[in-house]
Amino acid sequence: MTLGIMSSRKEEIQDLIAALEAGTEVVRIGMQEFHKGVLWGKAVVVVFSHWEKNTVAATAATLINQFRVDRIIFVGVAGAVDPTLNPEDLMAASSSGTLAANIRLG
């Protein structure tokens, strides 16, 4: 089983990339670098997805179609304001949705 790990911020995956075992392959597709290797004994592909929803969707599609990942985990901050949450807490969504905003400048 191969796991895809995505993040919308480079800072959130730097430690994961550094922890990949020797022999990691970096595959460049477009402007993205996919780090294919082994992390804690598991086959993974780690990638900075950027933050824009279409780019995130395209990155997920690339992980599925090009790298044949079985699962995708999106890591990083969720902007939560719950005071009971701590750094490195694991959260699992019970549902998902989208938010699209049209921003006009000027």
Image (cartoon, helix red, strand yellow):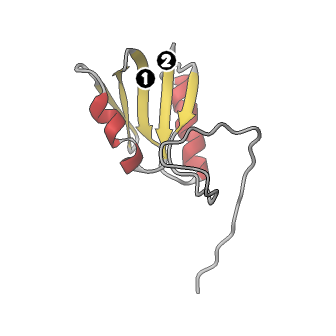
Q: Please report whichever mark, 1 or 2, sits nearer to the chain's N-terminal start.
A: 2
Q: Amino acid at mark 1?
A: Val
Look at mark 1 in the image and give the residue it sits on: 44
Residue 33 percent across, percent down from the top left:
36, 37
In the rendered image, the residue lying farthest to the front is: 84
Q: Are marks 1 and 2 in contact (CB under 8 Å)?
A: yes
Q: Quadrant of residue 94?
A: top right
Residue 26 percent across, percent down from the top left:
30, 29
Under circle 1, the secondary element is strand
For image coordinates 50% across by 28% down, the residue present is 4
**87 horizontally vs 28: left or right:** right
Q: Is disc 1 surrounded by few (<14), some (14 to 19) or many (20+) residues within 10 Å? A: many
Q: Quadrant of residue 105?
A: bottom right
Q: Quadrant of residue 90?
A: top right
In the rendered image, the residue lying farthest to the bottom is: 106
In the rendered image, the residue lying farthest to the left is: 22
Under circle 2, the secondary element is strand
Q: Amino acid at mark 2?
A: Thr
- Asked if residue 30 is positioned above or below residue 21 in the image, the reply reads below
Nearest the viewer among 28 and 34 is 34
For image coordinates 56% across by 44% down, the residue present is 56
* Figure quadrant of the C terminus: bottom right
Residue 99 percent across, percent down from the top left:
71, 57
Could you give the CA–CA distance between mark 1 and mark 2, rounded to whole angstroms? Answer: 5 Å
**24 horizontally vs 95: left or right:** left
Residue 45 percent across, percent down from the top left:
42, 27
Q: Total of numbered circles in the picture?
A: 2
Look at mark 2 in the image and give the residue it sits on: 2
